[in-house]
Structures are given as C-alpha cells and as structure tokens.
Amino acid sequence: MKRRHLLSGLAAVPALALLPGCAALSSNDAPVGTGDLGLVVERARGTLALVNTSSRTLLAEIGGLGDLSHASVVFSRGGASAFVFGRDGALTRVNLLSRRITARVLQAGNSIGGAISQDGTLVAAQNYTPGGVKVFDATTLALVADIPAVVNGKASRVVGLADLPGNRFIFSLFDADAIWIADLSERSRPVITKIENIGHQPYDGLVTPDGRHYIAGLFGEDGLALVDLWDDKPRARRILGGYGRGEAPLPVYKMPHLRGWAVAGRQAYLPAIGRHEVLVVDTATWQETGRIAVAGQPVFVIARPDGRQVWVNFAVPDYHQVQVIDTKTRQVVRTLQPGKAVLHMEFTPRGEAVWISARDDNRVSVIDTQNFTTLATLSMDAPSGVFFTSRAARMGF
Amino acid sequence: MKRRHLLSGLAAVPALALLPGCAALSSNDAPVGTGDLGLVVERARGTLALVNTSSRTLLAEIGGLGDLSHASVVFSRGGASAFVFGRDGALTRVNLLSRRITARVLQAGNSIGGAISQDGTLVAAQNYTPGGVKVFDATTLALVADIPAVVNGKASRVVGLADLPGNRFIFSLFDADAIWIADLSERSRPVITKIENIGHQPYDGLVTPDGRHYIAGLFGEDGLALVDLWDDKPRARRILGGYGRGEAPLPVYKMPHLRGWAVAGRQAYLPAIGRHEVLVVDTATWQETGRIAVAGQPVFVIARPDGRQVWVNFAVPDYHQVQVIDTKTRQVVRTLQPGKAVLHMEFTPRGEAVWISARDDNRVSVIDTQNFTTLATLSMDAPSGVFFTSRAARMGF
C-alpha cells in the first residue's frame, strides 16, 4: 500500500488512477459504511493506520504521507475522504475505502493543522511558515483563498483554527495578539473580521460544541481569551486571569491542546498550563468553579460524549498515565496505565469506548469507558493522533 | 428497485443474495462514504427515498417496506444499514449502498418506533400490539430479548423508547403509568429497573442530547415527568405542572413528538399540547423561563445543531407553515410556507441546511438556515419522516 508521491508545489495533484475495486464490500457482500472508520497517525514513518471501531481492528496502512509529527486530520462530509495536515506543510487527501492517496499539495513550509467548513466544501490549513491561512476546494484541492496573517508588516504564525457556522473559520495570530474570523460565504472573496486586545501570544484555541464561544489560550500571560460569537460585534474578554498567581510556575514540558478541552454539561474542564490541575469553569459566567488535582501536567482534557466523564493525559514525565474524572462528583475515579508515552485519546461516536495511543509501546488500546476493561489492543508503529469519521458531523473538529 | 418480500413471522429472514456491484463508487471512481446519506419515508407506497445531502439529490427509491405510516428509522454504527420500524409491526433492514432490503422480520402487530444501542449491536422496537419491547441482534435480526410490559396482569403499550449509555434502553408504559430502563449489558438477560409514580398516561419521551435526562409527556394531566438518570436511584419528578391551568384547552389535533424537543444551550424548548405556544424551560432548575407565541399547535420543535435557532412545525390547520425562533432573542424571526402538510424537518449534520417534507405537495424542500433561501426542491410521493445517517453517532436518535 505504500507509495511515494512527488510534491508539486501549490498546484493540486490530479486524483490518482484508482483500481475500480470494491473495497467497500464486506465479507457477506453487503457494502459497508464509513461511519465506524478512523485513522491513527503512525508518525515515525509517515503512515496512516485505517481502523474500524465496530470490529476494533486494523484494516490497512496507507503510506507516503510525509512528515506526520503533530499531524491532524479532518473528514469529508461523506466520510470517505480524510484531509491530513502534515507538519511539513503538505495537505493530503486519502480515500478510506480505496485506501489510497487521491490528492496532495505542498501548501506551506510548516503547518500545524486545519479545519473543514460547515458544508464540507472548503478545507483550511493554518500555517507557521509563512504564516496565514490557505483555503482549498475539498473536491479538487485547488487554492480558493490565501489569507496572509500580516499585521504592521509582519507575518504571524496562525494557531487555533476552527470552523464556525456559515462557512466561516476562526483562528488566532500568535505573533500579532489577534483573533480573526474569515467569512467564506463568497468563497473567493473572504471577509475578515479582526478582534484585537485579546491578550498576549494566543497559542491554541477551540470552539465550544455549540459553535458559540471561541477560547484562546495565552502563552504570554496567565489567563485565556473568550469570544462570544453570538455578539453583534464579537470582542475578547479575559477569563481565568491569574489562575496560577502567587505560586511558582513549574517548567512546562508540553503545551496543552486546547481543541481537546472539554465542555461537559454547563462546565468546561481546562488544562492548567504548567500545573498538576484541571480547572473547572462555569460556561455561563466563565468564572472558575473548581480545581481538580491530577497526576501531572494535563495535555488533553476530553469529555466523553455524554459529559459524565472527563479523560486526561499528561506531559512527560507522567505520560504513561491516564486519569478519569467523574463530572458529577468531580473526583478522579480511575487511574489507568495504558502504555508508555500516551499521546492522544479519541472516543467512539457515542462514547462506549475510548481509543488511546501509546507511542513508545507501539500500541493503541481500546478501553470500555464504563468498566475500564481493555477491549482490544492494536499494534501500531509509534501511534500519535487518533481521528474517527464521526468528527465530520461535529463543529470544531 | 422495487421488490416485495414475504414476511416470515418472528424469525429473521436471511440476507438476500446481493449483486456484488460497486454501488459505492462515485463518478470519478473514488468510493463514496455514507456520512451524507439519508432516507425519506414515502408513506403512501411503502417506499424509502435515498438522498444525498451534499449533492441535495434523490439517488434511488427502495420499495417493499409495507405500511410506513408513522414509520421511523435508526442507522447502523457504520451508516450503511437502516433499520425501519413500520406501523404494521415489521422491522426491516435496508442497505443504503446496495439499495436493497437485507433482512425483514414481522416482530409485532403494531409498532411505533425503535432505537439502536450505544454500541450498535442491538436494535429495539417498541410495540402497541401486543405491547412491550423486543430486542434484536443488529447483524442477524435474531430475537435477543423479549420484554413484555405487563403490570398487574395487563399488557401496556410502549412509547418513548430511547437508547441510553451502557447498552440500556428507556421507555414509557402508556397504560401502566411507568418508566422502565432495560439494561442489556448481558444481552440475553435484560435487567429491568422500574420507575413508578410518574404521572398519568405517558405518551412519548425523549433523552436529552447528553443522555442525562429523560422526559415523558403526560397525556392524562397537565405536565411532564422528568428523570435524572445520573441519580443513584432514578425517580420521576413533575415539571411544568399545570402549564395550561386556568385556560380553556383547545382541541388537540395532533400529539406533539417529544423526540424532536429541542435542547439549545441551557434551555429546552417544548411544544405546549393543544396551545399555540412553545414553552422554554431551564435545564438546571427545570422551571419555566418563558413562552413564545407561535402560529399553531406545535408538533416538532427542533434545535439547529448549534442551538442558535429552533424550528417549529404545526398541527392541522396550520401545517403549511414553519416558524424559526432565534434562541438569543426568543423571537420568531421567520415564517416559511414550504408546502402543504409539513410533517417533518431534519437538519444536516452541522446544520447549514434543513430538509422539510410537505406531504400534500409531494416534495421535500432544502432550506439554507442562515438566509432561508430554498437550495433545492425534490419531488417525492407523500413524504413524511426525514432521517440522516448522522443520527448513528448521536444519543437518543
């Protein structure tokens, strides 16, 4: 299955000739769907592992993806195509049913993620080098819009990119202390709304599950920036200002990932940077309502789809552990050790299981979220991110 | 595409021989997914219309489904199979890619809906005649569990069936004033929890999107029953008691559908039975926080996935209208007339469009939810329910 493809700069590569095989047929000859498929990034060798979350099996490996360190994935509206954002600036489209690369463009020098529009027609990539956001047609990967993030003559790195209702994208400018909203209702003429005075050095962001609030973490100060996107003139306000005040900061081993921040019921569960704590915030007042002591510096803090549990993994040296918080009691109810170097966790669509990657043990564990038994263990090469097709139907993923 | 199949009582029909065709291949030979597929019930002729919500087209019709009045549909975890609950007591499995019936059982005399378990392995049907719930294996349609709803020697009709986390199902007993929870963790030995003193004649129910609360409407009195499923010993409490008190009731032309009740942000929007009002309830206190006057007796009250809008259709004689409530201002911001006898509405997965069936105009309209333009009109024969595969990834659908 492994192929190598020449990158061809910014032009879209035509779809590769595909064998018209019936990859979608199951053993009993009834065609199977894409709702229970997913991809695991095997970062060391530029390969994606195709998995099925019903049978809990590894179906195939798809190679030739390039540099997949810190890679992320979004899915087409139909679920058959994945768009892979590589650290090397490549945007690659993979068909999960034919198990082949169908298009690939080198769109930047250094990229750290992307998003797909509400209607599935546009794919956006956020870039470190040269900065800015590029928007592509999901069908052809042709460039639709180029949005340089230049403020006062200086290009900024872009982080925290997410989709919003109405074919809009929101993102943060790390070097320009700003949050921008790009409206691509007219796809080739994006209308940019710029929000300033947000705080210093936004390093990542997320949209709440209802698409109403955008939160950017601030590297340059103790607190976060919150934007209510339902306001007529959205602006940023500071939340959790000085949450670590008066205490000596610990060295930060790994920046938390904000996209994984959890909104469970009325509370948001947020990783405290450089602290062994998860912060709890009321999403109406945006005031802190509690802190939960955990086993290390949290990286991903993710709610089970029903919000009853929040799962947390950690930065080195505590990254062999995963903790489960019961959101009713706000207690840690379970500490698991699913392997060395736990990098990511992904819930099945309705949350009966969670898939956890342990890079240095070369395996992904499937854990029952009700009784914490291990349902399956899949051998993979240095697995990192885990992405299921059910993300296609959700905002902010 | 139309076939007729003999019903064979309660035994599962073996999967039909299928042509090993490549129904899943798109025009450019890249296989397509199932994430943007859906079914529209053409109730008069026992036919399902297969649609694609990306291209907004009718792909095919699948016949031989029997009596589809009041039919409903749930989807397999993978998205390729639909389970159709017919009024005549038939449970039929249809493959959306081969566009054929793959299994069919006559499981009751009179059925009004069903649900699929969290892990997708079990399909449950709720029955009027002979009452009770039957649970089937999703792969074979073999009977797994038969749960008669008998109280004091009398069989009860079952309504308001929904899935809960942990392969449980919850449902209401219309004739026995009870709510039961069936835990199928051990699939052939269901454990039943019975909740009594819930109020008189529960006629339908829903689970909130987070799976935490179950609400049953009461036909026999003015109010609703609420169960907090996170309680150690779940019990029912009355909410909105006497919401129509002191006013002469209007004749009720059609019972509202509770499964469509909308939870948007912290508020639930509920149809007032026999009144031209939508009730607004705070989901923390479960106290009424407002009423919104609308054009008729509401039937479905459904939130757009982001919760910013709530769409309402109406009972006769106002069922040519649909109204849109802005949840920020709680004002009706638009009144549409999408056709005669509007029976159902379904949002696309991320809510950029809504599909509305107008039975007596034999058409389904696709409406842009941001600017209310009509994006497409599809001709269909007496369309009623509209069901998209994205339901597979959600609780309570």
Image: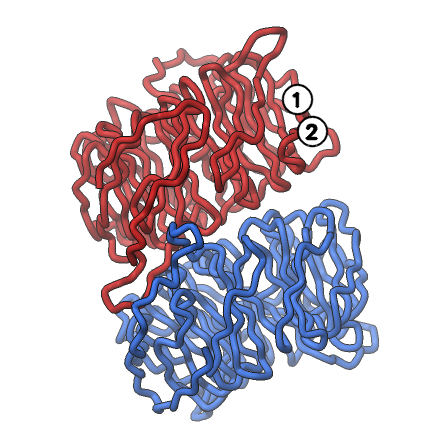
Chain colours: A blue, B red
Q: Position of residue B148 (x, y in %)?
A: 57, 18
- Marks 2 & 1, CB-CB < 8 Å contact: yes
Is residue B262 in view?
yes
Based on the displayed image, in which of its 4 quarters is residue B66 positioned? top left
The chain under label 1 reads B
Number of numbered discs present? 2
- Secondary structure of the residue carrying tag 1 is strand
Q: Residue at x 32, y 69 (%)?
A: A184
**As drawn, which residue projects farthest toward the bottom?**
A153
Residue B186 in the figure: left or right of residue B255: right
Q: Residue at x 42, y 50 (%)?
A: A28
- Secondary structure of the residue carrying tag 2 is loop
Is residue A144 in view?
no
Residue A318 in the figure: left or right of residue B20: right
Give amino acid for label 1: Ile
The chain under label 2 reads B
Q: Nearer the viewer, residue B118 or A275?
A: B118
Based on the displayed image, in which of its 4 quarters is residue A278 positioned? bottom right
Q: Which residue is labeled 1 in the image?
A: B195
Give amino acid for label 2: Pro
The answer for how far apart the CA atoms under marks 2 and 1 are is: 7 Å
The N terminus of chain B sits in image quarter: top left
Residue A8 in the figure: left or right of residue B167: left
Q: Name the mark on residue A384.
A: none
Circle 1: is it few (<14), some (14-19), or many (20+) Cα within 10 Å?
some
Q: Which residue is labeled 2 in the image?
A: B234
Q: Nearer the viewer, residue A22 or B217?
A: A22
Q: Residue at x 39, y 25 (%)?
A: B8
Q: Position of residue A191 (x, y in %)?
A: 32, 73
Circle 2: is it few (<14), some (14-19), or many (20+) Cα within 10 Å?
some
Same chain, marks 2 and 1? yes
Q: Position of residue B53 (x, y in %)?
A: 30, 53
